[in-house]
Amino acid sequence: MPNKRFYHIGFGQDDLGSSPPSIALLSGDPERSHLISQTYLQDVRLLSENRGLNSYVGYLPNGRSVLSATSGMGAPSLSIVVNELIQVGIRQIIRIGTCGSIQPHITVGSVVISSAALCRQGAANDIAPVEYPAAADPFLTVALVQAARELEIEHYIGITASVDTFYEGQERTDSANPYLMRSLHGITEEYRRLNILNYEMECGTLFKMAGVYNFAAAAICGVVASRTDSENIILEQRDIAIKNAIATAVHAATTLA
C-alpha cells in the first residue's frame, strides 16, 4: 500500500525505493538483522527501528534488492510483522533463527533447514485450522540445502517442532517453573521418536501464513543447544551457529532467480 507506513514495522512501500525488494531475510533478534545488513549486504539503508523491529534494505552480491527485517520473539510477534511485510510487497521470506536439537547426531554449531513443522502454536490457529499443513516452500528449501553444501556447512533437513514457549513448551524444568503440566512430560522423547529434529518458536506459524497468504517461506536455524545433553545454550558455539545460518541464507538468496 503506497504512501502508508505500517504501525508495527514503521515503513511502507514508498520507503523501499525504486527497486523494492521482494525477498526478506527475517530474524527474531534485531542485532542479527543489523549484523546481516552490515556484514553481508551492500548499499544498506536503515528503514526503521520502530519497537525494536529493526529493518534494513540493501543489495545482495548479485545486485538483487533484499530486506533484512526483525520479527521479534515468538509466533504472535512474527505474525504481525509478516502480515505487514506482505502488504509492502514481500513475496519470499527466509527465517534465520536459532534452535535446540533433539536428535543426538545433530551437533551444536550446525544448521537445521526445516522442511515442515509440527505446529503447536496459538497464533497459527488464528491463521488456519490445526490440521492445515505447515510446510516450507520446496524451492527455497532446496536453495538452502544447496547453499549449505556449497559452503561446506554441516546441515540437516527435516521436521521442526515449533512451539510457543521456550521453557515449558520445550520441556525445560531448570527455570522459574520446574513443574510442567502432565501433557508435557516426555514430549521431547516422543518428538525424537517421531524423527523431529529440533525445537524453535516461529516457523510453524510462518509456514501456515505462507500457505494462506500465498507467498514462499523457508527457515534455517543455527543449533545452539543439544537437548539430548543439556537444557542449556552452548554460548561458545552460538556465534558459529548463527554465522553458519546467516551465510547459508544469504548464499541461497543470492542464487535465486
Image (cartoon, grey):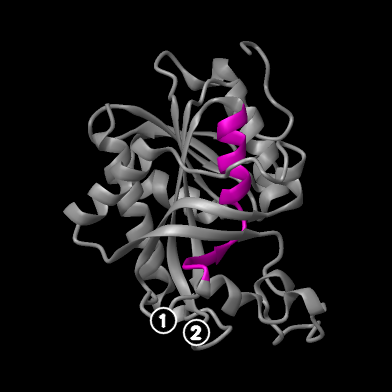
Please indicate, yes or no, whether residue 247 appears anywhere in the rendered image: yes
Q: Which residues are magenta?
A: 194-212
Q: Is residue 125 above or below residue 171?
A: above
- Specify whether 209 is left or right of 150: right
Residue 221 horizontal/vertical position (percent): 45, 59
Front residue of 126/67: it is: 126
- Under circle 2, the secondary element is loop
Front residue of 212/173: it is: 212
Name the quarter where the C terminus is drawn.
Answer: top left
How crowded is the residue under tag 1: few (<14 C-alpha within 10 Å), some, or many (20+)? Answer: few
How crowded is the residue under tag 2: few (<14 C-alpha within 10 Å), some, or many (20+)? Answer: some
Residue 213 horizontal/vertical position (percent): 60, 26
Residue labelled with disc 1: 104
- Are the residues flagged by discs 1 and 2 in contact, CB closer than 8 Å? yes
Residue beneath the point at 50% across and 66% down = 196
Q: Is residue 161 above or below residue 172?
A: above
Residue labelled with disc 2: 228
Numbered mark located on residue 190 in the image: none
Residue 80 horizontal/vertical position (percent): 70, 37
Front residue of 203/7: it is: 203
- On whether residue 120 falls in the magenta region, the answer is no
- Specify whether 214 is left or right of 166: left
At label 2, the amino acid type is Thr
Disc 1 from disc 2: Cα separation: 6 Å
Residue beneath the point at 56% across and 83% down = 232
Name the quarter where the N terminus is drawn.
Answer: top right
Residue 164 horizontal/vertical position (percent): 70, 59
At label 1, the amino acid type is Pro
